[in-house]
Amino acid sequence: TNIYILDQDKMKIMVFDFNGNFEKNINISDYWANSIYVKNETIFLSNNNSDTKYGKYRIFEIDINGNLINKYLPFQKRYRFSSDRSFSVMTRTSNTLFCNAPINYIYNVTEEGVNPTYLIDFGKNNLLKEYSYMSMRDFFAQGLYSKYVYGIDEIYHTAKYIFIKYNFNKDTYTAVYNKSNKRVEMNYQNLII
């Protein structure tokens, strides 16, 4: 088992053993990574908005030598919003979820693929697609922050719940989503997760 550290500036992943000894660099300059998740011999790279050698995709799956295995969730236009913490791993089972603002889907990530699993509905406060491509400056200047949730910012999960951090009206909220009944059970304002 190794430790993988993403260096966004140098477009590489540094690999260390558990004693902290450097083993190798993995070149990811053909991709872009805002965060990474490693499972067995597979590395998943999240890409918020960058165009790459392999096209515009939200997730790239590569091997431990940096070779492309697959790519998921293509996009055409660049969203102006993104998630702070895209991957959520439940360590006991290695079950992995992925989100990418302003899209309200939470995806299940497996070695077999990436599939939309949970749709978080903010009702009348769902961000309209036409505003997804605005700059944050324009979004706030037009007062839209008080009308719309601008995407899921972070997720954490357990076997039963997903804890969803999002922003609305200049405040931070945490929703507790029940995986079984696929409903938000509680909402907390300014709760740090």
Image (cartoon, grey):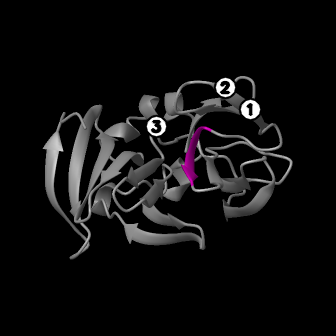
Query: Is 35 part of what is drawn in magenta?
Result: yes
Identify which residue is drawn at 32% across, 49% down.
Answer: 156
Residue 148 visible somewhere in the drawing:
no
**Residue type, mark 1 in image:** Lys
Identify which residue is drawn at 22% across, 65% down.
Answer: 160
**Residue type, mark 2 in image:** Phe
Q: Residue furthest right?
A: 53
Of the two numbered discs 2 and 3 on the same chain, state the one appearing first in sequence: 2
Image position of 69 (left or right of 80): right
Is disc 2 surrounded by few (<14), some (14 to 19) or many (20+) residues within 10 Å? few
Range covered by the magenta-colored residues = 34-39
Task: Identify the residue under disc 1.
Answer: 24
Image position of 43 (left or right of 139): right
Q: Position of residue 154 (x, y in %)?
A: 38, 44
Task: Identify the residue under disc 2.
Answer: 22
Q: Quadrant of residue 4?
A: top right
Task: Identify the residue under disc 3.
Answer: 84
